[in-house]
Amino acid sequence: MSDIDIRVEGRAGRITLNRPKALNALTYEMCLAIEAALDDWRDDDAVALVLMDAAGDKAFCAGGDIAVMYETGTRGDFAYGQKFWRDEYRMNAKIDEYPKPVVSLLQGFTMGGGVGAGCHGSHRVVGETSQIAMPECGIGLVPDVGGSLLLARAPGHMGAYLGTTGRRMGPADAIYAGFADHFIPEADWPDLTAELIATGDIGAVENAGQTPDRGALPGLQAAVDAAFAGETLRDVVAALRADSSDFAADTLKRLTRGSPLAIACAIEMQNRMGPGTTIREALALEYRFTHRAPEHSDFLEGIRAAIIDKDKSPRWRHTDLGAVPDEDIAAMLAPLGDEGLNLDTALG
């Protein structure tokens, strides 16, 4: 059985991620297949919209399939990861820029690479089980796949908080932070799918939307804005350490699970993004880090600790959250010259 099911049904181009036992983690081949489908349907008048969903009830997509990146990276082959990210980012940009409606049904876990596939479309649907997050700092990476741009668009400094702590968002919080648009009870998704296939009318999504239960993030906004007002991770850590609140203690605990280098770079990336930042600019900045990640960051060590040895005890390059040298951050985010991201290259 294929890892991805791509077909046209009625008025809808359908993309179904089909690796439920792997929480629908994206492989390199799946990324290329999604891009090829989008290209095929772009000028096809029979396809009124694109509908993305996933098999199983545990996850839309829990991330990218990073085990191969570990295998190749530990052999000194950094080109595979660079190719994966380059081509995945091109797919992410095409979803963001697509001229037709793109509907995504985001049940269960939608994290990392799943955000890149599911959260750049025009109509992002969450349900009761939805849990959306950007947890990359926990494996030594920065929020990528265009997620840095979604974070930058979140209210106040909420993006820096979510991107560095990897905090999961339920349906209401995902809508609040700008990672989703509509809450529709999951029991209603089959009828919604049938209507979209039959009519190609995107109004079906908007008409089915309901108000979810209130989330936690609005109540944290003031505390987040105060804690993350500083320009650097050093500033954020100092503010949190000077704060005796439960929020500060919880946030420090969350931050200590991640790579100090990745967290510091994630904050710097948020600082560099303004209201007019485009998806292509965000992806190009992300690629500066990910291109270098297997060789020069904590990425391989983070994967080892999380999914290879599973000891949950990564040995990060920097031991103090508040003492990551500015030059190390600058080196990871410096321009790549001729190696920079080019989203206009051909498939594969």
Image (cartoon, helix red, strand yellow):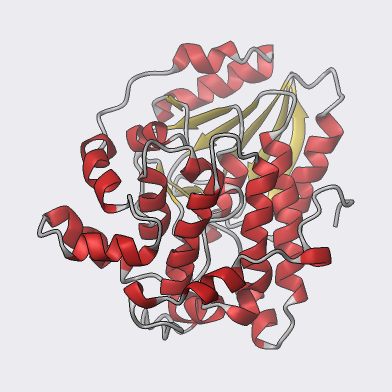
Q: Is residue 178 visible?
A: yes
Which quadrant of the figure contains the N terminus?
bottom right
Which residue lies at the image location 33% right of the left edge and 73% below the top edge? 322
Q: Is residue 259 visible?
A: no
Q: Residue furthest right?
A: 346
Give how far across and how far down residue 40 sits, in percent.
Answer: 86, 34
Q: Is residue 161 left or right of residue 77?
A: left
Q: With respect to residue 18, does 170 lie above or below?
A: above
Taking depth in this image into account, of 30 and 316 the one nearest to the observer is 316
Which quadrant of the figure contains the C terminus?
bottom right
Taking depth in this image into account, of 94 and 320 the one nearest to the observer is 320
Which residue lies at the image location 70% right of the left edge and 52% below the top edge? 89
Give how far across and how far down residue 252 sits, in percent.
Answer: 25, 65
Give how far across and how far down residue 188 sits, in percent.
Answer: 44, 23
Q: Is residue 305 left or right of residue 144?
A: left
The part of the image, by quadrant, that contains residue 131 is: top left
Give how far across and how far down residue 128 sits, in percent.
Answer: 35, 35
Q: With respect to residue 186, does 70 lie above or below?
A: below
Which residue lies at the image location 43% right of the left edge and 54% below the top edge? 163
Q: With respect to residue 126, does 115 lie above or below?
A: below
Which residue lies at the image location 37% right of the left edge and 32% below the top edge? 176
Q: With respect to residue 36, does 83 lie above or below?
A: below
Taking depth in this image into account, of 20 and 34 the one nearest to the observer is 34
Query: How many labels, in total?
Result: 0
Q: Residue furthest left?
A: 244
Q: Is residue 86 left or right of residue 20?
A: right
